Amino acid sequence: MAYWDSEKKTIVRVKPEPYPDHPGWWYIDCGCCAGLEWGGDYPRECHDCNGSGFVAYHEDSGALAEYPGGPFLGSMGKHRIKIDA
């Protein structure tokens, strides 16, 4: 999951990883900060990943879900992620 590197002054994101038991599905970094939304007056759990820091990405369809077969979060559509396995 993403985190802030204060020395480099940049957001560091985690590389996609395949789900071991679900071919074609990948763990991808949600982009939140360790399960919390960026900014704001107080920490708030990310509503996209429910605080896990990751979402599931289906390579063939571009679908996003909380986990493979789980609640649908939308689709990458034509903006699919290129995953280098």
Image (cartoon, rainbow, N blue to C red):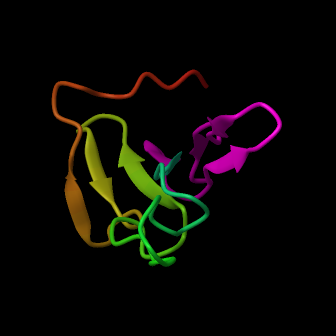
Image quadrant in which the N terminus is located: bottom right
Asked if residue 67 is among those painted magenta in the image, a careful observer would answer no
In the figure, 76 relative to 1: above or below? above
Image quadrant in which the C terminus is located: top right
Judging depth in this view, the residue of 58 and 16 nearest the camera is 16
Residue lying furthest front in this view?
41
Residue 63 is left or right of residue 85, and the answer is left
Judging depth in this view, the residue of 27 and 10 nearest the camera is 10
In the figure, 36 relative to 45: above or below? above
Image coords of residue 59 (percent x, y): 36, 36
Question: Which quadrant of the structure image shows residue 72?
Answer: bottom left
Give the residue drawn at x 34%, y 72%: 47
In the figure, 15 relative to 75: above or below? above
Image coords of residue 3 (percent x, y): 66, 51
Give the residue drawn at x 58%, y 44%: 18
Q: How many circles with numbers are drawn on the protein?
A: 0
Asked if residue 20 is among those painted magenta in the image, a careful observer would answer yes
Give the residue drawn at x 54%, y 68%: 35
In the figure, 51 relative to 3: above or below? below
Give the residue drawn at x 46%, y 52%: 30
Image coords of residue 26 (percent x, y): 49, 46
Task: Please give the range of residues in magenta.
Answer: 1-27
Question: Which quadrant of the structure image shows residue 77?
Answer: top left
